[in-house]
Amino acid sequence: MLRMTKNPHDAQDLVQEAFIKVYEQLGKYDRTDSFARWMYRVAINHCMDKFRI
């Protein structure tokens, strides 16, 4: 997140929001895939969504 925002405060906010999003979407996690990869994808998509706004 820090690499994408280049601002530590914005990155911290995005990480916190991403963890909440991961928690809310746990039901969509496919256990045949890597949890770390899935969580990373949710976090990156969340960050990209924030940049689109």
Image: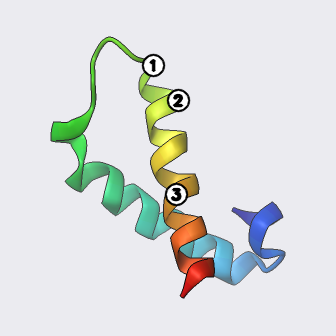
* Closer mark to the observer between disc 2 and disc 3: 3
Amino acid bearing label 1? Ser
Amino acid bearing label 2? Arg
Q: How crowded is mark 3: few (under 14 residues within 10 Å), some or many (20 or more)?
A: few
Q: In the image, which disc is placed on residue 37?
A: 2
Q: Earlier in the sequence, mark 2 or mark 3?
A: 2
Answer with the quarter of the image where residue 35 lies: top left
In this image, 21 relative to 46: left or right? left
Q: How far apart are marks 2 and 3 (CA)?
A: 12 Å
In this image, 53 relative to 22: left or right? right
Does residue 40 sit above or below 2 in this rendering? above
Mark 1 touching mark 2, by CB under 8 A?
yes
Does residue 52 sit above or below 2 in this rendering? below
Amino acid bearing label 3? Asn
Answer with the quarter of the image where residue 11 lies: bottom right
Question: Which secondary structure, mark 2?
Answer: helix
Question: Which secondary structure, mark 3?
Answer: helix
Q: Mark 1 points at which residue?
A: 34
Q: In the image, which disc is placed on residue 20?
A: none
Q: In the image, which disc is placed on residue 45?
A: 3
Percent of width and height locating residue 43: 51, 54
Answer with the quarter of the image where residue 28 lies: top left
Residue at (58% x, 80% y) in the render: 52
Q: How far apart are marks 1 and 2 (CA)?
A: 5 Å
Q: How crowded is mark 2: few (under 14 residues within 10 Å), some or many (20 or more)?
A: few
In this image, 40 relative to 6: left or right? left
Mark 1 touching mark 3, by CB under 8 A?
no
